[in-house]
Image: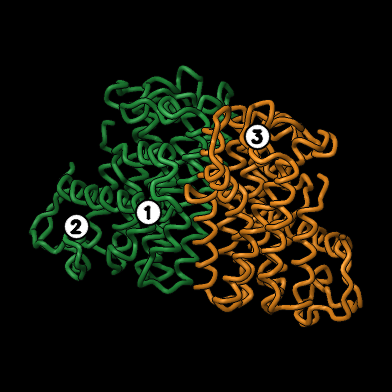
Chain colours: A orange, B green
């Protein structure tokens, strides 16, 4: 169910005033089409990501130097992908009444950090993956040294980018976003999750440990996507809290689906090696609960997530549709 | 010449009001002793770094979990070293009239980032070093995967730490520090320098390329240490600019000395493998200019650096002494 009918559009969308036609979403429609929404938002994010790379290259002492480093950053940052994280950030910002422009630098930073985590996770010393999104992984193309450094560069630039390019937001809110983003990435966030994930390979682990892994490795960044959007958009503490709960639930559902797809989808569908988790005896929800119970748990989490959005009614149509998209995706 | 005589102390030092005895530097003295100064500041920084780790561990969902990741972070962050970067940051902050407390979180963050760069540089895919500061490198103790992740965690936490714990500074100044720090680390900073350094191994390179490497690999972070201290301390644009010029000059001098020491010092003195640069045919100032001319260039840069501090007179005694320390160190 990827299409939603609605007789009203989010009024916040109409309120966007901006000179960039790419940011103008005020074309009136009577129905909400997720696929059209995703296409439009992906285009917006791709354009913004290209601009973020151009800004970085232009600010080098010799613009574009060293070229191989910028090539490596661009190779992974512009490798496609669903751009779910920046799209969630933008949607949360709009939901609480903010404009797209205030969240766009942070949306880009979130994709930079997600990309960094993929580059580093794929390294031989970690998951040792040769393919990602249907293409050779960063270290297969540029070498391990460059892959490590491109990841480091993207991580540092992400924080710089938020601090430098966020406009129209009180600076203390920008600092709150940086603080939460750091915590979502560091030992208390995705890095912590990746560590426990690596330590758990070939081990029998508890459901609690599996929850820890996914709440940190995937959930923490997804949560900060939504929460940072809410903070930048001027959301109240209660709104931010609701959106945080929403994001936690869809984050876990997302990971459960990822585990399910590793079993059920082909490598071609995934754009990366399928069946990898089983091959390295990785703990997953399907291995712990079975496929059916895992799917049921994912569905239950999506209902929990959606319940958090009730106060917004049909204004939350994009986030509601994104929540469905996450559980119904096939790759 | 490690001791400076002075009949006045920096009045900013006396003005520090703080309840933590470790931050109280108001004990009156008539002479400036660099060794006493360094000992006191190193103790202050070590205490603050331990606190930064405790805060991170305490903020985990399960405090201190995952323990091996925190062990890996602590192993390298608390491995000693001169703590020059945080000390430079604190000194610049005081020089423009700021208190130590406003710069201390950033000082810690600078050491976290420096530590991250050492952990990643030592990896087999990069410089492949087995020893650092007289101890096995991070990946030799914790494995390559953990070393990469501990570095990532320190890098992300550094930005979080500044955003979360800096107090008593207008938030737009804190954002400026984060922006400059990001630029000093990313492709436009130390990562760019490391990339060109790796690409230059075994190559004949120009003096311009060697300058690029060092201005980025070492210089950019050293500069942002001093500049961030000045910004946090409330320095004027002119003061910040002077301190930036000071830092650029000592940054390059520092790197030239590092190259010289790789030739002249023993592994025991360095706490890492000596003669490494020659062994891998790394381009260095001594290999380009010879030892004597390299030493002369370092001395000239120190004079350029000191000239920037003239308007402050004897108030700049700590930074002047640190500049001398950098060129006269033997390890």
- The residue at which mark 3 appears reads as A122
Q: Quadrant of residue B266?
A: top left
- Quadrant of the drawing holding the N terminus of chain A: bottom right
Label 1 secondary element? helix
Q: Position of residue A80 (x, y in %)?
A: 79, 47
* Camera-nearest label, 1 or 2: 1
Q: Nearer the viewer, residue A66 or B310?
A: A66
Q: Circle 2 sits on which residue?
A: B22
In this picture, is A54 found above or below A317?
above
**Residue A6, x across and y down, in percent:** 87, 76
* Label number found at residue B58: 1
Q: Tell if the residue under mark 1 belongs to the same chain as the one under mark 2.
A: yes
* The image quarter in which residue B227 lies: bottom left
In the image, taking residue A57 as reference, residue B30 lies left or right, namely left
Label ID, residue B123: none
Q: Using residue B165 as the reference point, say whether residue B8 is left or right of it.
A: left
From the viewer's perspective, is the residue at label 3 or at label 1 nearer?
Answer: 1
Discs 3, 1: same chain:
no
Cα–Cα gap, marks 1 and 2: 22 Å
Gap in angstroms between the C-alphas marked 3 and 2: 44 Å
The residue sitting at 67% across, 61% down in the picture is A107
User: Helix or strand or loop: what does disc 2 sit on?
Assistant: helix
* Res A204 quadrant in image: top right
Which of discs 3 and 2 lies nearer the camera? The answer is: 3
Q: What chain does badge 2 belong to?
A: B
Distance of mark 3 from mark 1, alpha carbons?
A: 30 Å
Name the chain under label 1. Answer: B
Report in which chain the residue with disc 3 lies: A
Question: What crowding class fits label 1: few (fewer than 14 Cα within 10 Å), some (14-19), or many (20 or more)?
Answer: some
Q: Are marks 3 and 1 in contact (CB under 8 Å)?
A: no
Most foreground residue, B28 or B53: B53
């Amino acid at each position: 169910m990827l299409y939603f009918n609605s007789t009203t559009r989010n009024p916040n969308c109409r309120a966007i005033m901006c000179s960039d036609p790419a940011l103008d979403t005020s074309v009136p429609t009577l129905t909400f089409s997720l696929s059209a929404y995703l296409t439009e938002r992906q285009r917006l994010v791709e354009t913004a990501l290209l601009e973020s790379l151009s800004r970085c290259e232009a600010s080098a002492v010799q613009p574009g130097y060293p070229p191989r480093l910028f090539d490596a950053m661009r190779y992974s940052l512009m490798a496609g992908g669903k751009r779910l994280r920046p799209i969630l950030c933008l949607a949360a910002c709009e939901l609480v009444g903010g404009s797209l422009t205030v969240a766009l630098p942070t949306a880009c930073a979130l994709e930079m950090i997600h990309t960094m985590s993929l580059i580093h996770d794929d390294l031989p010393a970690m998951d040792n993956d040769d393919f990602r999104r249907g293409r050779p992984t960063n270290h297969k193309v540029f070498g391990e040294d460059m892959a490590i450094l491109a990841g480091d560069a993207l991580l540092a630039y992400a924080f710089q980018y938020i601090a430098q390019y966020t406009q129209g937001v009180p600076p203390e809110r920008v600092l709150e976003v940086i603080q939460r983003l750091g915590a979502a990435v560091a030992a208390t966030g995705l890095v912590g999750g990746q560590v426990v994930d690596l330590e758990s390979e070939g081990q029998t682990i508890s459901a609690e440990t599996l929850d820890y892994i996914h709440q940190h490795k995937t959930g923490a960044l997804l949560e900060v996507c939504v929460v940072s959007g809410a903070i930048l958009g001027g959301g109240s503490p209660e709104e931010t809290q609701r959106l945080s709960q929403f994001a936690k639930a869809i984050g876990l559902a997302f990971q459960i689906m990822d585990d399910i797809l590793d079993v059920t989808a082909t490598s071609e569908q995934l754009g990366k090696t399928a069946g990898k988790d089983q091959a390295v005896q990785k703990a997953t929800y399907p291995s712990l609960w079975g496929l059916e119970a895992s799917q049921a748990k994912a569905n239950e989490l999506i209902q929990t997530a959606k319940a958090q959005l009730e106060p917004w009614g049909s204004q939350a149509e994009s986030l509601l549709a994104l929540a469905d998209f996450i559980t119904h995706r096939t790759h």
